[in-house]
């Protein structure tokens, strides 16, 4: 797709409207936050359309980071972006110690955030992939209370980052069993697909098969008139996170 296509212009305009005077990005309006700023910048990176004054966004994020809010998700968003742009991202060891002691989460998404921050600080804990592998089920997927495509995606991201061997064939068989209605569902028995489940299945295939599934028809049905993308086929408001997942699938590579 062309970098000057109407779709790209719409995406840029969507994020322009979400940008706060401070440089950060908001969910809809009001004060900016780490999460929406992360997804805005990552989206604009993919379509090669970062704002000329992206340094203003990074200044705001760096100042926010210095104030010391250390919930796992926010820490991941801030550390990842700041590290990507050569800004100060490191946190004090006492906060890293909290991550070292609390990564065993039933939601592997949270484990992924914690592990990513530790790896950014040069720490690859052997216990992390061991914990992840303990959550693999007989069907090849991952999840403490049964397999689903979201936990399976984050398991694959973590295991690949640590260079740990695991049965790719079994994982792919589970992912394939989640396919239906033009995308990946949360489990083989659930429907319909949503942007986060389709993104998860897309990434599993991208990592393990080295291929990008063509799910463009599904993704384009999620596009809203404001240029952003929603979660559901049926209705919903555009959000930076959903828009990033759509942009990644449509434009990456």
Image (tube, rainbow, N blue to C red):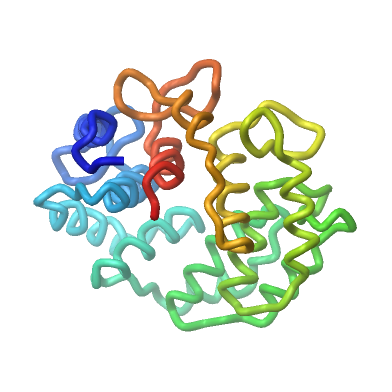
* Placement of 71 over or under 250, stated as above or below: below
- Between 104 and 126, the one lying in front of the other is 126
- Between 104 and 17, the one lying in front of the other is 17
Left or right for 234, reference 28: right
Image location of residue 198, percent across then percent down: 58, 40
* Placement of 235 over or under 66, stated as above or below: above
The quarter of the picture where residue 40 lies is top left
* Placement of 114 over or under 191, stated as above or below: below
Q: What residue is drawn where x is 46% and y is 83%?
A: 122
* Residue that lies at the very extreme toward the right in this rendered image: 138
- Considering the image in quadrants, where does the C terminus appear? bottom left
Left or right for 135, reference 239: right
Left or right for 170, reference 191: right
Left or right for 65, reference 198: left
Image location of residue 132, percent across then percent down: 72, 66
Q: What residue is drawn where x is 28% and y is 64%?
A: 66
Q: What residue is drawn where x is 69% and y is 59%?
A: 105
The quarter of the picture where residue 199 lies is top right
* Placement of 179 over or under 73, stated as above or below: above
The quarter of the picture where residue 220 lies is top left
Image location of residue 88, percent across then percent down: 26, 72
Q: What residue is drawn where x is 53% and y is 30%?
A: 218
């Amino acid at each position: 797709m062309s970098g000057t296509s109407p779709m790209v212009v719409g995406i840029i305009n969507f994020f322009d409207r979400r940008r706060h005077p401070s440089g950060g990005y908001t969910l809809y309006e009001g004060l900016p936050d780490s999460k929406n700023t992360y997804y805005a910048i990552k989206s604009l990176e993919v379509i090669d359309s970062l704002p000329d004054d992206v340094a203003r966004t990074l200044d705001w994020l760096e100042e926010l980071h210095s104030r010391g809010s250390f919930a796992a998700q926010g820490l991941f968003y801030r550390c990842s972006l700041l590290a990507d742009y050569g800004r100060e991202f490191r946190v004090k060891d006492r906060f890293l110690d909290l991550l070292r002691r609390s990564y065993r989460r039933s939601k592997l998404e949270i484990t992924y955030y914690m592990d990513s921050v530790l790896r950014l600080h040069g720490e690859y804990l052997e216990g992390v992939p061991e914990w992840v592998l303990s959550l693999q089920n007989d069907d090849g997927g991952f999840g403490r209370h049964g397999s689903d495509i979201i936990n399976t995606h984050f398991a694959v991201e973590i295991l690949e980052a640590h260079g740990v061997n695991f049965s790719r064939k079994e994982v792919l068989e589970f992912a394939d069993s989640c396919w239906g209605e033009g995308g990946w569902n949360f489990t083989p028995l659930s429907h319909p697909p949503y942007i986060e489940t389709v993104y998860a299945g897309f990434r599993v295939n991208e990592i393990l098969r080295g291929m990008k599934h063509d799910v463009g028809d599904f993704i384009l049905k999620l596009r809203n008139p404001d240029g952003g993308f929603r979660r559901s086929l049926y209705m919903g408001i555009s959000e930076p996170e959903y828009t990033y997942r759509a942009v990644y699938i449509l434009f990456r590579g």
